[in-house]
Image (cartoon, rainbow, N blue to C red):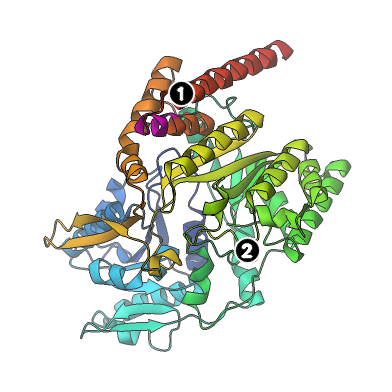
Amino acid sequence: MTDSSVQRSVLLLNSHSRDGVYVSPPVGLVKIANVLRKGGVACDILDYDIDDEAPFLEKARRGAYAVIGMSVTHFQMEADLDRVWKFRQTALQSGRPSWIVGGGQEAAMNFRQWLDVALDLIFLGFAEKTFLEFCRRVLTQEAEGDARGPLSLLTADMDGVAFLRDDGGTVFRPAGALEPALFKELFFDNVMELDVDYAKYWNRVRADFESETVGAADFVFENVRLYTSSHCPRRCGFCSSQTFLPFSQDGASRILSVAPEQLIALLHRYKDRYGARMIQFSDDDFGIGAGAGMQRVTEFCRLVIEEKAQGTIPRDFRFSCQARVADFLVRGEVTEDALAAMARAGFLGLSLGVETFSQKLLKAPSINKVGVTVADCRKVLDAALRQGLVPQINIILGIPESTPDDLVETMLETCACIEKGCDVALVTRVEVYQGSPMSTNPDYTVRWRHWTNPHDGREVAIADYFEPRDPVIAHVCDHFKTAMAAELQAIKKERGWEGKTAHKRIVAFANLIAVSRLLERPDLVKRFQDAVEATCAAAAHKSLASAEGR
């Protein structure tokens, strides 16, 4: 039943984080909400990691939301579809239906399917201001008593949108090229204004977390995530980050980044307002290359070191980032000075997309690490460790071109890296990211999964992952999830960690043990179980030493 007394507003939804990921505020949605509220549009955020959806559904049932927008994912598209359709059907009960819209990388790169199965409209590129204008038009139209839609009128003269025409054809209007002034407004000015309940998230992680001393890098609960560049310069075969912005806008643009002085301003903002003790730079590649990109990083480090010496930044303030091995190589030699500067500034974690320790696979189209060898990876990792940094190595075990020998080679090298002081994050399958070079390469076979719409019975085929060519590797991928869950549960039970989130190093060892069992390699099982024992013993010794020192 229509309740005309309910003020119409906007609801933003996120997707639930992957299992094992430490929950943190949905920064992208918070940035959009800030733009809406500054523009006079009321906005709620439903964070599925931490919120109960019931009160938001009740508001939708009463007709509160004129627009419902979701930052959708592909890896858990089924759950996102369930939620979008639940809110669509609930809003219909009010007699005041909502426009159901989406945005972000996954929505843009798979726009046709999302429009076919769930969304009315997709926003392309960095669309905060476009989204604000759309919401204003919707609310103005309703206030003036006009009938709903159509989209062709609501989006007239609006770039950066995609939707279906009544005849089933697609309207795709790319966004304008991202200019430096707009980049600064969205990535710096807007971020300086955000108001986020960080304490709620930090307390949640602290309650869920276990064995923080197991990892090589100290864990800082009071951390914030920042995104400081427009897009990734790399050409990895499995990744679509490189193509998102060029695809979404009218022509390519150079990579834009937040300047070192602005990074310092953001640091002070989060330190002073929220009590942050660490910043995670969550760009795909914080370094953005060995030239001007790393000059930006080293200048930022210089400013941090200077302020720590002056006492304006606490000496124990920490940082982490994602980077690439190639960022630290000039003509094949490691730029150890850059790593040293990062260590002196207080960087703890340095996430590096190594992907594999097989030289053959590094050059395979699915990985495509241009200009990097396994020897280069070892050199950069060793140099980082010498400087006191903790590299986190990202490894893919189920690369389509992989053989069992390739897999074992990478697993043994990965274990050795952990023992030297690295942290590791492993995945088994190469998932399909729409828009990646692999996704358009017919040489790779895609495995599919399916979702059935509970409201109309329509079945949706979802590209899942790329099938390994070797039957043994395919067997590992098919049975890995169950095997890994069993191994991790066994470790948690033995250690008394049931109901807690195990540290990523323990998760990595559980991965290696599970794969070894699937390969029927008891020698490897024992090798990695022994590594778990040694790691936990070292962690216990560290905890005891810390307690005795207090």
User: Residue 275 appears in which quarter of the rendering?
Assistant: top right
Q: Is 515 colored magenta in this rendering? A: yes
* Magenta highlight range: 513-519
Q: Which mark is residue 229?
A: 2
Residue type marked 2: Ser
The amino acid beneath tag 1 is Asp
Comparing 352 with 525, the one in front is 525
How far from the left and from the top, in percent, is residue 276?
Answer: 65, 42
Q: Quadrant of the N terminus?
A: bottom left
Which one is in front, 135 or 325? 325
Q: Does residue 363 appear anywhere in the picture?
A: yes
State the image coordinates of residue 550 (x, y, percent, origin top left). 72, 14
Residue 327: mark: none
Q: In this view, does 16 lie above or below 203?
A: below
The reply, left or right, for residue 387 in relation to residue 206 is: right
Where in the figure is residue 233, as x and y percent of width and height? 61, 66
- Mark 1 highlights which residue? 523
Q: Seen from this angle, which residue lies furthest left?
A: 457
156 on left or right of 377: left
The residue positioned 31% from the left and 52% from the top of the image is 56
Q: Nearer the viewer, mark 1 or mark 2?
A: 1
